[in-house]
Structure formats: structure tokens, C-alpha cells
Image: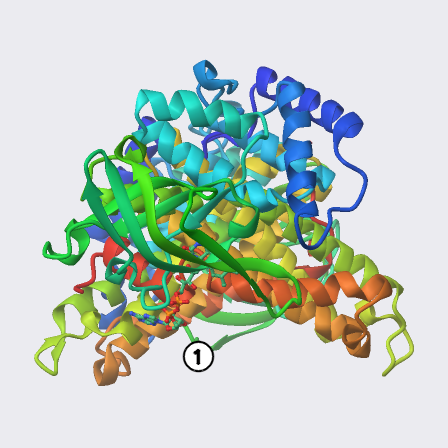
Amino acid sequence: MDHQFTEDDRRFRQDVRAWLADNAPTEPRPDDGPAIRAFDLAWQKRQYAGGWAGVSWPSEYGGRGLSLIRQMIWFEECGRRGTPPLGSLSVALNHAGPTLIMLGTEAQKAFHLPRILRGEDVWCQGFSEPGAGSDLAGLRTRGVIDGDHLLVSGQKIWTSHAHLARFQELLVRTDPDAPRHAGLTWIICDMTAPGVTVRPIRTMVGSHHYCEVFYDNVRIPLTHVVGEVNGGWSVAMATLSFERGPGLITSQMALARQVADLIALAGGLPDPMGEGTMLQDDAVRGRLAQLNAEVAALRSMTRMAVSRGLRQAAPGAETSLPALYYAELAQRVQQAAIEVLGPAILEREGWSEAWTHEYLRAFMDTIAGGASEIRRNIIAERLLGLPR
Amino acid sequence: MDLLPDAEQEQIADSVAAFLRAQAPAARLLERDRPHASAERGLWPRYAALGWFGMGLAEDLGGVGYGPAEEALLYREIGRTLASPNILAARLAAEVAGRTGQPDVGQSLLAGDITAAVANPTGRCRLGPRCSGRFQVLDADPDGRVVAWNDDGVAVLQLNQFKIVRSIPSLDAGVSLAVGELEDATPSAWISAQEAPLPAFAMVMVAAMACGVAEAAAASALDYVKFRQQFGRPIGSFQAIKHHCANMALANEAAWAQTVMATLSLDDDTATRNFETAAAKFVSTEAANLCAALNVQLHGGLGYAAECDAHLYVKRARLLEQLGGARRAHRDKLMSFPMTA
Ligand SMILES: Cc1cc2nc3c(=O)[nH]c(=O)nc-3n(C[C@H](O)[C@H](O)[C@H](O)COP(=O)(O)OP(=O)(O)OC[C@H]3O[C@@H](n4cnc5c(N)ncnc54)[C@H](O)[C@@H]3O)c2cc1C
């Protein structure tokens, strides 16, 4: 057991830190619309030009080919610096890329991985449908083989950033007669193909984050299938396990900073009910101390996950643990923020708006990427071996 | 950076676990209506022979020469079978004696010839070259040493230095309780936290014991829900039960990961060490309380019965929570999260 980093890793961290100090964007990230894409891609391009894109991705596809630990250090330093979130690039960087690296064909890897790293494409994930969310294997969007193409018809929903994306991880039913999990195919869909219609949906935050996507006889070459035709379930499971992987670190670091900000804020806000500051209130102080202990534990869980990752090829069911812990902790942090802010939470402008925004945003954490209830089922059944 | 034990560390943990399972299984405590300090003392020479008291002590102090990582694995196993927290007292006393020019006392403690007992402060206390306050002494032994610690340091005393020692029925039947007061007593040895970060060390090892309690309670619950049938199926197939089990696994992952981080950060700067250890104590005792309570709940009527071992974990979890101060006592250390340098 060892929590120290090697001399080389420490030097790497210093290099990352120095580079980010000079190169991290200082202008605020736009909140809505195509400006998001322009901003996210520009930041990715800058990382690529600096030689920092795809730290742990294979070097033959434009990555740095370094260890998972270095990838973690990169994300930690981004988190410390407060660089913009992966945002519209999170699908490309966190799971489409890793899925292709593990299961893509040579041609798919050679085409897509460098484009992702160079900041050319936004990706989205077309798994959920109106009738199939938690029960993903119940999806009905059809893919019919027609020569060397797949003809896709149906509908996806809640597709994050579909309105900004060029490519999509699309999961469709190619064999309606097979058992539910056996008839699915994972294919790369070009969002500019004829027959694709995207309709953005406003969220409770007030901006457009996700979309409905309609497919009307969209022709996709079979060479875009990742894995086997009808073998899409295992590819999708790999994708979801990456989604719960080390990309979480930036969110986790953002949470650590939020708690630090909240403690500073509480230290300066007069307690409307008493003499001192909010931080001197016994209940508030206890709550913030607890959040910091939990933020620390989350950081330790992530490092435990990376330690496991160094010994296994693909992430296992344990990756649900830090993901679930993060999601629920993020919401506890927002609830504490409301206690500290008081009525200021109602005013959507000025210094308090960021907190109001975060409060609303955090509702998604326990739904997107698998609802908490489903994650608990996964932990109980796959990790603990309880009967289905 | 690798938070998992290496092969040798795993071997240490396995051999400790095998010994405790055979010689001191948690269920041994069911045979007692009231605690018998002497029964736990019977194991003392065995622990000494296995080198547990000196596992993490440097060889020039008569120890085995492993470090806090190996000891955290040891104390996790100690927690798992509810073995005596006084093992930690002996370990602390041996180091304090060795470092304060009393190598003979240190040797006798390591050999198990002198026992040691935890003295846990019940309120404000003063520890230093002079000690005052009210303490709960665990499994007090008139001939042994008594070890008290707080954020200022670790003091080693004798039982006869305490005024009005009175034995009191104990919540945790695995440990007897005596309360006594010190009034300006001079400890036989004292080490301040500046000289050696022993209070932080003690806090992490209590956290490690709490992890063991939490994991044992969760494992007991998990076994039972796979076995117990109602409505024609194992109760573990019901989702409400699955989610309780998932919550235990979640709390235990957080607790052990943080305890490992805290263990490894004992050599870091003071603020980092204080933060990490306080966080470990916090999440591990939370996990122990949660798992112990759910283990009772998931055993149903049986869980409430004295004959079932579920209550033992509830009580030990509360004991460990109080050792060295519960959450309120350490929250000021948690106000600033240290980022990796
Ligand atoms: C902000 C956001 C972004 C998203 N982005 C994407 C995306 O990019 N791509 C994509 O494919 N999807 C995306 N999703 C969709 C997300 O994956 C689904 O919303 C999620 O899997 C839940 O599915 P559902 O919405 O159909 O809810 P349902 O499955 O209907 O669930 C409703 C409630 O019932 C509970 N429930 C369902 N089944 C069970 C069960 N067996 N046991 C216990 N409780 C159960 C759920 O936990 C939930 O609380 C996004 C969602 C959000 C909120």
C-alpha cells in the first residue's frame, strides 16, 4: 500500500500544473446553444496542441500512451485548476473513445480516435428511449440489415448534446426474435445522415442539455458496427462501465472545491439568527465537516478504483461504488448550500446564481448514466451476489 | 500510488484473520452475560507471541519493524472479530515506554508480561506531564498500565493513580468498564503529539477496527439474507433488502479507502494528517454504526435476541465511535481539504 507518487509522476504533475496555469481557459463557458460546442472543442484543440490530449490513450492514435495514474493526475490537476467540465465532449472522451480502444476495428480507431483527441467531433450517446430507460434491454429502435447497410428507424430520448454532436453511440434492435439482450447492435451513427431529426429539450435548470432524436430509415454502413451485429449488449455494458470510470475525477474535484467555497462563504456570512457567522453555527459547522470527510472518502475511493484498474483489464461492478457515492454526495452538498445561502437561493443572478444552478443541475446526478436505484441493484446482484 | 495491499501484506492480514477466527470468534462474547476481562486477558500471551503489540514498532524499540499499513490490516481484523481494543493500548504504551527511556517496560509490554488498558476521557481532560480528568478504563487490570490519549499526546499511567475507581455495567459486554478520575497525576511516561503523531496513529487504528466491525456486520447480514426464506424465496431477492446491502457495501468501500489513505498519510504534514485521520474516523464509525444497525434489522426478531451476535457489533461500533472522541470532537480538523501536492 502506498499513497505516494513516483518522482516521475510528481514531475508529470508539476508539468501539467504549469501548463494549465498558462493555458486553461479563463473566459466563462457558455451555458447554452452551439456556443458550448465551439468553446469545448477549442479547449480540446488547445490541449491537443499542447500534447496533453488522451493521456492514457494509445500513442498510435494520437494519445500519450501513459498509465492510468497519469490520466488520474491530469484530471486531478484540471479539477484543482477549475478547468471547464468535459461538457459536450464527455461522451467522446469518457466512453466512446475507451469503447473504441477496447472493441473498435482498426479502421474505426484510426478514423475516430485522432479526431476526438484533436477536438474535431462532439459525440452523443443514443441508448435511452421513451419506453426503455432503466430497462435498457427493452429498447425498440429497429436496425434492419439491407445489403452492407443498417436501416435504422425509431426514437431515442434524453440524448445529451445530440443537438451539438457529429457522431453517436447508437444502440438498436437488430433481431426482434432473439432474447432481449441477444438482439442488440452498437453502431456509430453520423448525426448529419439523412433521416436523423434532433429536437432539443429544456431541462429544469432552464437550458438545453438533452434531446429527442428521431430516425427515419437512416442508412448506416455495417462497417460502423462496433463489436458484432447482435452482440451490442456487451459493448454497451463496456461503455457504461467506462462512463463510471476515472472521468469522474473532475466532477469529484469540483465537489471538493464547492465544499471549500461553501466553508469560506459560511465563514463570511452573518448568521441571521445569531451573533456570529454561519460557520459558527453548530449545525452548519457539523454538516460542512461531514461533507469534507465524505469528499475525502470519495477521493480515496477513486484512488482505490484506480489501484484496482492497474490490476484488471476492464473495470468491474465495483466502479458503481464511487459513481453512486459521488451522485448522492453532490446532492447533499447542494442541500447544505441551501442551508447556508438562505433566501439568496431564490435569486437567479449575481453571486448566488452559481449555487442555484448547481442545486438544480445536481438532480441529474442520480438519474443520468443509471439511476441510483439501478446502481444499487447492480451492486447487490453483481458485487454481492444476491439473487435476482 | 497503489492503495491495495501487496502479497506480503495480504498474507499478514490472512494469518491474523485465521488466528482470530479460530481463537477469538465474535460469538465467544455471546457466552458472557457480563464482561470478563480475564477471558480476554487469556488471549494476551498469544497476541504477544504473534508479535501483534510490536508489529509496527521499529526494531530498535523491540518491534517487528512493519509500518502503519500492516497495522491497519491487523486492526481491521481485530475489529472484525471484536477482539480487545486494549491491543492498541499495549502497542501505544510500548512505543511511549521505548521512546522515553524505559526499554524494560517496553519489552514487558511487547512480551505481554504487562498488560495495558485504554483510558478514554469522558469530557474535558488535561493530558501532559500532569494529567487530570474523568476516564473510562476498559478491562482494567490493577497490575497493568493504563493509556490515555487526546490531541495533545499519549500518557501512560497506573490504575492506582486514578481516584475512586468504580466498575460500571458496560454497554459493550465484550469490554468491562471502570470509571476513575485523575487529579494532577504524573504519568509514568508521556509523549506529546509534536514529538510523535501517536494520537493520529491511534485514531486511524480505531478507524481500522471500525472498518472491521462494519465489514463483519455487513457480511453477517449478507449471509443471512441469502439463506433466510420468506414468501417462498430468499429475502435477499427483495429489492428493499438488496438496497440495504448495497448501502452497506458503499459505506464500507468509503470507510476502508479513506482509512487506507489516512494510514498512509501519517507521515505527511500535520494539517494533512489531521484532516485525513479525522475523515477516516468519521466515515468508518458511520459505516460501523450503519452496518451494525442494518444487521440487526435484517435478522428480524432473531436480530433483537441476545443469543444472536448482531447486537455485539452495534455495541462495539458505539464503543469505537467514542474512543478518542466522536465526530463533534474532530470536526475543526475537517474544515480544510488538503489537495495533493
Ligand atoms: C441529464 C440527463 C442526461 C442524460 N443523457 C443521456 C444520454 O446522453 N444518453 C442516453 O442514452 N440516456 C441519457 N439519459 C437517460 C438516462 O440514462 C435515463 O433517464 C435513466 O437510465 C433512467 O431511465 P428513465 O428515464 O426511463 O427512467 P425509468 O427507468 O422509468 O425510471 C424511473 C424511476 O423508476 C426507478 N426504477 C426503474 N426501474 C427500477 C427497478 N428495477 N428497481 C427500482 N427502481 C426502478 C428509477 O430508478 C427511477 O427512479 C440522461 C438522463 C438525464 C437526466
Is A313 situated left or right of A27 in this image? left
x and y percent of residue A88 in the render?
Answer: 58, 45
Is A47 situated left or right of A1 in this image? right
In the rendered image of this protein, does residue A297 appear above or below residue B234?
above
Q: Subunit of mark 1?
A: B
Quick check: which quadrant has ligand 1?
bottom left
In the rendered image of this protein, does residue A174 appear above or below residue A19?
below
x and y percent of residue A275 in the render?
Answer: 91, 78
How is colour applied across the structure in the image?
rainbow
x and y percent of residue B235 in the render?
Answer: 18, 75
Which residue is situated farthest in the left direction here?
Answer: B232
Quarter where residue B325 is shown: bottom right
Q: Amino acid at mark 1?
A: Pro
In the rendered image of this protein, does residue A367 appear above or below residue A72?
below
x and y percent of residue B184 in the render?
Answer: 75, 61
Q: Is residue A267 visible?
A: yes
Q: Is mark 1 within 8 Å of ligand 1?
A: no
Q: Is residue B328 visible?
A: no
Name the residue nearer the viewer: A333 or B42.
A333
Is A305 situated left or right of B161 in this image? left
Q: What residue does disc 1 label?
A: B169
Which quadrant holds the C terminus of chain B? top right
